[in-house]
Amino acid sequence: MSRKSLNSALLAEMIRNKRESTNLGLREAAEQIGKFSASTLLRIENGNLPDLDTYFKICTWLNVPADYFYADNLKEENPHKKAIALLRADKKLPPKTANMLVEMINLAYGYIEGNDKFQKEKK
């Protein structure tokens, strides 16, 4: 059985990017995510692993599935996840631009998979 490890660097980067693009401080983001302390969020942004409850709240806030940050998942042939991971990790790309591109990618894949709200509106 292969062991999966959490990509804490990607988790931290995505949290920072979303905070920067939404102009949220640590306190405001921590409150918005799940009513925990700003120091907890700072530790996570510094690469420490959150507890499970906090992790699930962060994934919901980032709008990604809970398995998104597992290293094995990024190695799979999944162009959707790879594209998003590359955009989030690109230091040259402004966080706001990366977030908009991620939203576009999610909409496109949602449309392809038939899970997008636009499919319902089309009917």
Image (cartoon, rainbow, N blue to C red):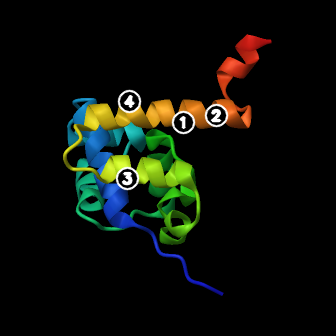
The answer to whether marks 2 and 1 mark residues whose Cβ atoms lie closer than 8 Å is yes
Labelled pair 3, 1 in contact (Cβ < 8 Å): no
Q: Is residue 108 left or right of residue 5?
A: right
Going from the N terminus, do you reach mark 4 or mark 1 first?
Answer: 4
Which mark is on residue 110?
A: 2
Percent position of residue 121, x then y: 71, 12
Q: Earlier in the sequence, mark 4 or mark 2?
A: 4
Residue type for callout 4: Met
Residue closer to the observer: 4 or 36: 4
Mark found first going from the N terminus, 3 or 4: 3
Is there CB contact under 8 Å for labels 4 and 2?
A: no
Q: Secondary structure at mark 2?
A: helix
SS of the residue at dot 1?
helix
List the single residue furthest toward the bottom.
Answer: 1
Find disc 3 in the rendering and name its residue.
86
> Disc number at residue 100?
4
User: Which of the two residues, 105 or 18, is positioned nearer the viewer here?
Assistant: 105
Identify residue type, mark 3. Answer: Leu
Give the Cα separation between the discs numbered 4 and 1: 10 Å
Q: Position of residue 3 (x, y in %)?
A: 56, 82
Which residue is depicted at the point 36% across and 65% down? 8
* Distance between mark 2 and mark 1 Cα atoms: 6 Å
Residue type indicated by callout 2 = Gly
At a point 30% along the width and 53% down the height, the residue shown is 89
Which residue sits at x=68%, y=34%? Answer: 112
- Asked if 81 appears above or below 123 in the picture, the reply is below
Disc with the residue nearer the chain's start (2 vs 3): 3
Secondary structure, mark 4, is helix
On screen, residue 104 versus residue 43, left or right, reads: right
Binning the other alpha carbons within 10 Å of mark 3 as few (below 14), some (14 to 19) or many (20 upward) gives few
Q: Which residue is mark 1?
A: 106
Q: Is residue 18 shown left or right of residue 65?
A: left
